[in-house]
Image (tube, helix red, strand yellow):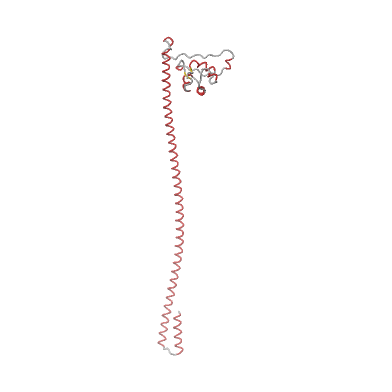
């Protein structure tokens, strides 16, 4: 634009001084028109470029917004994945703890089963030993008795009667332990200084508590100490006194 103004000014100056020919003037005018056309084209290109720059800026803004949104979405997915991972790890720990608890319970149950099995075997052995001892004692008693006084084969010896004290004293007499009948009656004397509580329950017919009191108050020098030490009632002592011994 400034070039066109300069050319116009030069032409006007030449005309003013009268030293420019008409042909020269026309040449300058054509040159000026060409410059004006170039200037208009340049302005149009500038406008197109400015429009493109604006479009690129708008596209850049949209791309930046989309990129920001994508970044936020990626962050959200990352956090969600981390939370899900933590939840899965927590569930895995809980399942592992449950497995350990179940294994411990199974081990405890197995130990209880083995202990119960051992107790069962011990009880079987004890029962067999008691049966053997009972049979041996019965055979010993039968062999010691004269043939006329032996009980018939297959029948238990008669039970011994329980003596009852006469008169009013019978009302204050403590309850007597049940007298054993069957194979336990008439056996060899039981040493109350060495026999176990189970043996006294089995062979004398004492209650478990009474047999344990007999064991707890050992030793005895005389049979009558069972009554003197309040271990057994007088009536019970009268029943078992002929079937006990106090040898060391």
Occupied quadrant, residue 188: top left
Nearer to us in this view, 72 or 209: 209
Q: How many marks?
A: 0
Occupied quadrant, residue 66: bottom left
Q: Residue furthest top?
A: 148
Q: Quadrant of the N terminus?
A: bottom left
**Residue 179 x %, y %:** 50, 17
Nearer to us in this view, 120 or 135: 135
Q: Residue furthest bottom?
A: 18
Nearer to us in this view, 132 or 26: 132
Occupied quadrant, residue 122: top left
* Residue 96 located left or right of residue 164: left
Q: Is residue 147 above or below residue 217?
A: above
**Residue 170 x %, y %:** 57, 15
Q: Is residue 57 above or below residue 133?
A: below
Q: Is residue 42 above or below residue 91?
A: below
**Residue 10 x %, y %:** 44, 85
Nearer to us in this view, 37 or 64: 64
**Residue 208 x %, y %:** 50, 23
Q: Is residue 63 above or below residue 195?
A: below
């Amino acid at each position: 634009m400034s070039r066109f103004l300069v050319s116009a000014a030069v032409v006007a100056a030449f005309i003013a001084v009268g030293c420019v020919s008409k042909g020269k003037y026309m040449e300058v005018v054509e040159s000026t028109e060409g410059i004006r056309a170039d200037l208009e084209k340049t302005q149009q290109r500038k406008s197109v470029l400015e429009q493109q720059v604006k479009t690129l800026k708008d596209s850049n803004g949209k791309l930046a917004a989309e990129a920001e949104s994508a970044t936020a979405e990626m962050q959200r997915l990352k956090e969600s994945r981390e939370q899900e991972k933590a939840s899965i790890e927590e569930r895995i720990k809980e399942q592992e703890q449950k497995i350990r608890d179940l294994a411990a319970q199974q081990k405890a149950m197995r130990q209880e089963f083995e202990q119960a099995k051992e107790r069962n075997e011990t009880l079987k052995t004890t029962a067999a030993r008691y049966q053997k001892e009972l049979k041996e004692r019965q055979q010993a008693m039968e062999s010691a008795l004269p043939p006329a006084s032996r009980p018939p084969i297959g029948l238990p010896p008669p039970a011994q009667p329980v003596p009852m004290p006469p008169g009013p004293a019978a009302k204050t007499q403590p309850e007597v332990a049940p007298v054993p009948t069957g194979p336990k009656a008439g056996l060899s004397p039981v040493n109350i200084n060495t026999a176990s509580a189970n043996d006294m329950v089995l062979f004398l017919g004492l209650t478990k508590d009474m047999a344990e009191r007999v064991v707890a108050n050992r030793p005895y020098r005389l049979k009558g100490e069972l009554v003197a030490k309040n271990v057994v009632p007088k009536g019970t002592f009268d029943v078992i006194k002929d079937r006990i011994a106090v040898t060391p």
